[in-house]
Image (cartoon, rainbow, N blue to C red):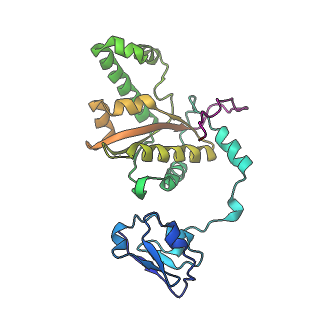
Amino acid sequence: MPSIHIDYSRCVGDGICAEICPLKLYRMEDNKPQLLKGAGAFCIACGHCVAACPKGAIALEGMTPDDCTPVEPGLRISADAAEHFLMRRRSTRAYKPAPVARHVLEEVLDLSRWAPSASNRQPVKWIMLEKPEEVRKVAELVIHWMKDMMAQDMEAAKKQRLPGLVSLFMAGQDMICRGAPHLLLAHAPAGVPFMAQDCTAAITYVELAALAHDLGTCWAGYVTWAANISAELRTLLELPEEDQVYGAILLGYPKYRYSRIPERFAPSVRWR
């Protein structure tokens, strides 16, 4: 609930703030923006009014125009470059053993702050496993959980291909964490609307930021599944009891590079 300040000596009355505010906390009177009564209590601190005002006339508590990074037109990427960047993202399942430097992981993770979240709640919390031996331990606990699932209901386990995954792991083929040196998990309170979407968006930002740093990533679906059921794995990860893991990805330097972009199905769309 930040306080909102309008510097009328800078304001030119263009009304951008009133139009752009997601909660419509501004109204225009005599060509000047006025705040609705109690606006600060409803403000979600998205900063859109601060960022959009061309004259820098609006500030929030803890967020002034000078606190914001200027948009650099020269850094805008072309549509062709964006298309190629997005199309060349691959799920990496073979990694070099060399770990990624901490500062690179921090830079990649930091960009997740700008992923969209419902009402700008920014609820996503992260667990980054830096040590390859810890990632390996997670894979082992996932396999242990799979064995428990097989013991409880083999037919259901077979439908999820768990026996094959266990057999491969025991033979030295890690299909859970793929030998990745790092593992990142996103968690947030369970049972709260839009937590899954918020975490998914944040992880996707991490994926794309990682690609820009020449890192490979892959969603670790079995880790996500097990982390919400296996008490042993939750204890290892020190997950808060009230939280759910909504996604996990592997991180590391790809062992191989791709020379081509494989084809994909066209979007399934109903135009109305």
Apparent side of residue 179 relative to residue 124 in the rendered image (left or right): right
Which is the main secondary structure of the residues drawn in magenta? loop
Residue 3 or residue 139, whichever sits in front: 3
Task: Name which quarter of the figure residue 245 lies in.
Answer: top left
| Residue 226 appears in the figure | yes
Residue occupying image coordinates x 60% and y 36%? 269
Task: Name which quarter of the figure residue 26 lies in.
Answer: bottom left
State the image coordinates of residue 189 (x, y, percent, origin top left): 31, 46
Task: Name which quarter of the figure residue 169 lies in.
Answer: top left
Give the magenta-colored segment's residue range: 253-271
Find out whether residue 154 is within the magenta segment: no
Residue 236 or residue 3, whichever sits in front: 3
Residue occupying image coordinates x 54% and y 50%? 108
Residue occupying image coordinates x 40% and y 13%? 158
Residue 211 versus residue 133 in the image, above or below: below
| Circle count | 0
State the image coordinates of residue 84 (x, y, percent, origin top left): 70, 42
Q: Residue furthest top?
A: 155
Q: Residue furthest front?
A: 272
Q: Quadrant of the C terminus?
A: top right
Q: Quadrant of the N terminus?
A: bottom left
State the image coordinates of residue 142 (x, y, percent, origin top left): 37, 26
Residue occupying image coordinates x 41% and y 18%? 160
Apparent side of residue 16 relative to residue 145 in the rendered image (left or right): right
